[in-house]
Image (spheres, helix red, strand yellow):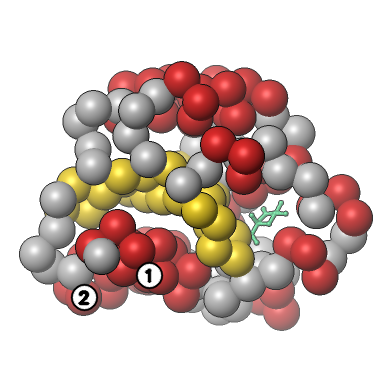
Amino acid sequence: MKILLINGPNLNLLGKREPGIYGNQTFEEYFAALQNQFSEIELSYFQSNIEGELITKIQEADDSFDGIILNAAAYTHTSIGIGDVIKAIQTPVIEVHISNTFGREEFRHQSYISPNAKGVILGFGMQSYELAIHSFLK
Ligand code: DQA
């Protein structure tokens, strides 16, 4: 099984960005722990702050991965293009968020990803990604 984790803008700052909301761990540390925990599957990771790069990566991932776990970060709430690419591909996408976006500002309640995602996992901190991997394994 091959799973691609994709993080959107500012998630390269995890560990130092608003630790009260996003915690103290860098994504690189967490990703290494995930690779140990799920050694039976091939996990890949991509991060970009650029909307078009995220769209291109999702297009390229179609058919070469069994699943995509996507935290589109702020683009979740603004990007029709990312919403459209999820509709266009066959590979299932699970939307994840570290924070509970529904407990935050109203503009975070809107998602262009959710209508076309296989499912949505949010509010469990970094564990949101792990839960998404488990759901692909089931
Ligand atoms: C986030 C929530 C978004 O609203 C925010 O813009 C992010 C991170 C999360 O993982 O909680 O950058 O996607």
Query: Can residue 46 be seen in the rendering of this structure?
Result: no
Cα–Cα span, label 2 and label 1: 9 Å
Circle number at residue 130: 1
Circle number at residue 37: 2
Camera-side residue of 47 and 119: 119
Question: Are circles 2 and 1 on residues that touch, CB within 8 Å?
Answer: yes
Task: Please tell me whether residue 95 is drawn above or below residue 134 in the rendered image.
Answer: above
Task: Please tell me whether residue 10 is drawn above or below residue 27 in the rendered image.
Answer: above
Query: Can residue 127 be seen in the rendering of this structure?
Result: yes
Rendered residue at 68%/25% (across/down): 80
Secondary structure under badge 2?
A: helix
7 left or right of 40 in image = right
Residue 104 x/y as whole percent? 83, 65
Question: Residue 47's image quarter?
Answer: top left
Residue 94 x/y as whole percent? 46, 50
Q: Image quadrant of ligand 1?
A: bottom right
Residue 60 x/y as whole percent? 32, 22
Earlier-in-chain disc, 2 versus 1: 2
Q: Quadrant of the C terminus?
A: bottom left
Which amino acid lies under the numbered mark 1 shown in the image of this protein? Glu
Residue 134 x/y as whole percent? 31, 68
